[in-house]
């Protein structure tokens, strides 16, 4: 298939600005582009110049505003129809993108003085990861993730794009983050395609672990070592549970430390309002690239917009408006702190119970200090059997992962019920051990 001239021009820009990043692109990543001459570009020109009639875009107008049903607008009366019913730009509402960038700088001091692009709105985190997969992953490429991971990585990078998932143990023998294992996995890519996509998901799903500052430095050093050894690294920070840091761990994304690290490292931040602002159903996320080159950032944005145009066209406008309104509210920080303290109280109560000794022998637990989850390592019983016993006998839902691990989402349990929850899990473990299940 002949390559589109616009795609070729973007590729030439990327290769000129950083040949290593060009080498990271998948076949689809090289072929994709955002049409400069098409419906959206012509509509944008008409919005600016058509002062009599604008008959370009496929929405309906009535009395100068987007047509709408009163049964819907009545429930959204605080918002102008133009901020709800019209299409959002493929890259997202401009004011939202700027507000999210300002939030990133406030939350991540290590980004100060670093060069990174304007966040591009996605249809939440999974969509952002899917864009990364489309742009950079292909058959035979290595996607490096820990052995305790979110199962959707396999679907997004492995099944959809044909990449090979490479695991390393999340914890080392000291129950610390296994930076040596990460480094070995990265260096193993020298003998493959010479490219690695590494996903750094902190707080981790399913364990709720975020590395310490020292461990964070070790992670960055491992990625630098791989780059200096000739590996082109797409370093993706999946910051789905960002800001829910309850103990002495990293309290910002590694994206800031990865920005400007090495010419062979392309940092990509995937984050969003989904978990951070407790708006799971709004489906508002962001993807952000870091590079010293503005031209490279612009080319990557154009390719990202091409992926968005070819898949969802643009994200939902109402939820982007809702998130923007929240970010602009003077009550935003106060209300977020209130919810953070509730979540921290739940996590602390879980740890207090687990460290009390009352469940001795039934399980160990993996280190956790952040996020929504924690993971039990059951002793001498099958996690799946315990999961089924909890569900069938006690009406309690948990997630079995592998033979021994049971994930518990303390995020959705009121603090006063956490003791009952873990007592019930303990009872189910004893049931299975004693043959009552």
Image (tube, grey):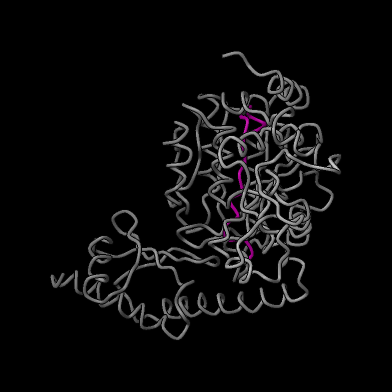
Q: Quadrant of residue 76?
A: bottom right
Q: Residue at x 73, y 44 (%)?
A: 259
Residue shown at the point (32%, 76%) measured from the top left:
360
Residue 255 located within the stretch drawn in magenta: no
Q: Residue furthest left?
A: 435
Q: Nearer the viewer, residue 236 or 57?
A: 57
Residue 294's place in the image compared with 321, above or below, is above
Residue toward you, 54 or 172: 54
Q: Single out the residue that lies furthest toward the top.
A: 2
Q: Please give left or right for residue 396 compared with residue 255 in the image.
A: left
The foreground one among 85 and 187 is 85
Residue 12 sits above or below residue 278 on the image: above
Left or right, 204 with respect to 7, comes to left
Please tell me in which quadrant of the rendered image residue 330 appears: bottom right
In this rendering, the answer to whether 411 lies above or below 116 is below
**First to last magenta residue range:** 226-243
Q: Which residue is painted at 53% across and 49% down in the image?
A: 126
Percent of width and height locating residue 306: 64, 33
Q: Is residue 234 magenta?
A: yes
Picture coordinates of residue 271, whole percent (x, y): 62, 53
> Is 432 displayed left or right of 331 in the figure?
left
- Image quadrant where one finds the C terminus: bottom left
């Amino acid at each position: 298939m002949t390559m589109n001239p616009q795609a070729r021009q973007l590729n030439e820009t990327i290769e000129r600005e950083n040949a290593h990043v060009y080498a990271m692109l998948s076949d689809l990543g090289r072929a994709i582009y955002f049409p400069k001459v098409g419906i959206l570009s012509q509509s944008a020109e008409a919005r600016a110049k058509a002062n009599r009639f604008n008959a370009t875009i496929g929405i309906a107008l009535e009395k100068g505003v987007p047509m709408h049903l009163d049964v819907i607008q009545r429930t959204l009366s605080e918002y102008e129809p133009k901020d709800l019913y019209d299409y959002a730009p493929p890259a997202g509402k401009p004011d939202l993108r700027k507000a999210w960038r300002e939030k990133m700088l406030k939350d991540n001091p290590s980004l100060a003085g670093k060069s990174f692009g304007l966040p591009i709105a996605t249809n939440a985190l999974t969509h952002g990861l899917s864009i990364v997969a489309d742009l950079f992953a292909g058959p035979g490429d290595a996607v490096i993730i820990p052995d305790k991971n979110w199962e959707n990585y396999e679907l997004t990078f492995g099944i959809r794009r044909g990449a090979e998932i490479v695991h390393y143990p999340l914890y080392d023998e000291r129950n610390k983050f296994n930076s040596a294992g990460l480094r070995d996995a990265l260096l193993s890519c020298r003998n493959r395609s010479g490219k690695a996509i590494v996903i750094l998901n902190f707080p981790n799903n399913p364990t709720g672990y975020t590395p310490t500052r020292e461990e964070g430095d070790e992670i960055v050093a491992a990625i630098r070592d791989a780059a200096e050894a000739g590996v082109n690294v797409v370093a993706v920070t999946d910051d789905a549970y960002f800001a829910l840091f309850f103990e002495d761990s990293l309290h910002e994304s590694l994206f800031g430390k990865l920005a400007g690290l090495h010419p062979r490292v392309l940092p990509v931040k995937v984050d969003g309002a989904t978990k951070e602002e407790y708006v799971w159903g709004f489906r508002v996320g962001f993807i952000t690239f870091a590079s010293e080159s503005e031209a490279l950032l612009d080319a990557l944005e154009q390719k990202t917009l091409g992926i968005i145009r070819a898949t969802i066209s643009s994200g939902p406008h109402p939820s982007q408006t809702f998130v923007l309104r929240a970010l602009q509210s003077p009550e935003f920080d106060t209300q977020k702190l209130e919810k953070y303290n509730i979540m921290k109280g739940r996590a602390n109560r879980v740890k207090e119970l687990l460290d009390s000794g009352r469940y001795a022998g039934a399980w160990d637990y993996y280190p956790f200090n952040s996020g929504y989850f924690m993971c039990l390592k059951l002793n001498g019983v099958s996690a799946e059997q315990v999961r089924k016993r909890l569900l069938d006998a006690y009406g309690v839902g948990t997630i079995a992962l592998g033979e021994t691990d049971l994930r518990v989402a303390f995020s959705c349990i009121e603090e006063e019920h956490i003791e009952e929850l873990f007592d019930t899990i303990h009872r189910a473990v004893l049931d299975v051990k004693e043959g009552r299940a």
